[in-house]
Amino acid sequence: AQLEEDLHKALESNSFDVFYQAKVDSKGQIVGAEALARWFHPTRGLISPADFIPIAEETGLIIELGKIVLTKVCKQLQLWFEKGIKIPVAVNLSARQLINQNLQDDILNLLHQHRLPNELLELEVTETLLLENLDAALPILNAFHRNGIKVSIDDFGTGYSSLAYLKSLPLNTLKIDKSFIKELPNNENDKAIVEAIAYIAKALGLSTIAEGVETKAQLNFLQSLNVCCFQGFYFYKPLPVEAFEDVMNQQI
Ligand code: G
Ligand code: G
Ligand code: NA
Ligand code: MN
């Protein structure tokens, strides 16, 4: 309850920031980023989204927090766009946001206000969340698709993925959950799961990205499966804007 009260205050006092974690291709080139919310608590210091996102969801504050994150990301995308840095940034969406009727208008308005090509914003949604809210989410997903906003399924493999649904939804990418990457290439079950996901994705015309890549051995195995892209500490941690820009500038 204390944390809930603090969350209210934090929303008023703008105590949130966004970190950026690079997504790279098989050559290690940065091809995108994921935006990750950070909360700087006055006494507790940095609080992980794993701890405050669930509270924000329960209390409904996630709608407001989600808008703050989306707005910060669009502002940042505009600054980068003007500097010639044109990489897409993915924002995580919670269930409450996805079924909110205003979401698509809010997002399209933000992109317009910041004079951004729609392709620069991407969205990440978990599979369970999506399938549990499919009736409300489908028209919104269709609207994103029509408007060139890509949607990834986050933490893929951990929910009750119905392959039939996957086929019928306007999705672009499967993000292989980091729990399946952790013990590669030694765990035979995880190897089989990751191979199957890569195969399904290919068959359904979806691209894949592996998250939580921490070692060269994991990377080698994933590359042998033609997984397109990678995200993880082996490459880059989630970084504050300035540090992320340094990385981008070194690459150009
Ligand atoms: O950044 P970190 O790896 O600690 O993130 C922990 C979890 O919080 C992840 O599941 C991530 O998807 C989620 N998360 C981070 N930022 C946001 C956000 O802005 N909105 C939502 N809904 N979830 C987020
Ligand atoms: O649930 P989601 O997929 O959005 O989670 C992203 C989370 O994964 C963030 O909390 C981020 O800090 C974390 N993360 C990113 N890269 C790695 C990694 O290589 N290893 C581990 N263990 N966590 C990672
Ligand atoms: Na995510
Ligand atoms: Mn994930």
Image: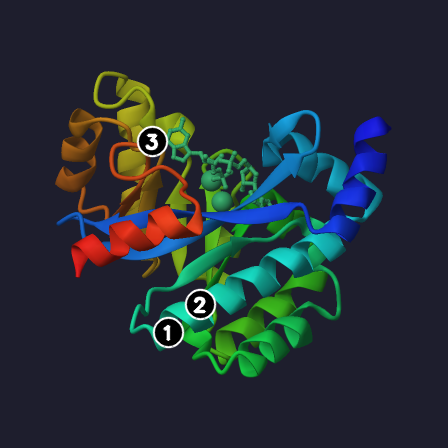
Judging depth in this view, the residue of 187 and 214 nearest the camera is 214
Check residue 81 in the rendering and tell me which mark sits there, or answer none.
1
Asked if the residues shown at circle 1 and circle 3 are in contact, with their CB atoms under 8 angstroms apart, the answer is no
Kind of residue indicated by mark 3: Ile
| Cα separation between marks 1 and 3 | 38 Å
Could you say where residue 50 lies in the image, as x and y percent from the top left? 60, 32
Asked if the residues shown at circle 1 and circle 2 are in contact, with their CB atoms under 8 angstroms apart, the answer is yes
Q: Is residue 209 above or below residue 115?
A: above
Q: Is residue 68 left or right of residue 212?
A: right
Check residue 77 in the rendering and tell me which mark sits there, or answer none.
2
Q: Which residue is mark 3?
A: 193
- Point out the tag, 1 or 3, that comes first from the N-terminus: 1
Q: Is residue 200 left or right of residue 74?
A: left
The response on whether ligand 1 sits within 8 Å of label 1 is no
- Point out the tag, 2 or 3, that comes first from the N-terminus: 2
Element under disc 2: helix
Judging depth in this view, the residue of 122 and 165 nearest the camera is 122
Residue 87 falls in image quadrant: bottom left
Kind of residue indicated by mark 1: Phe
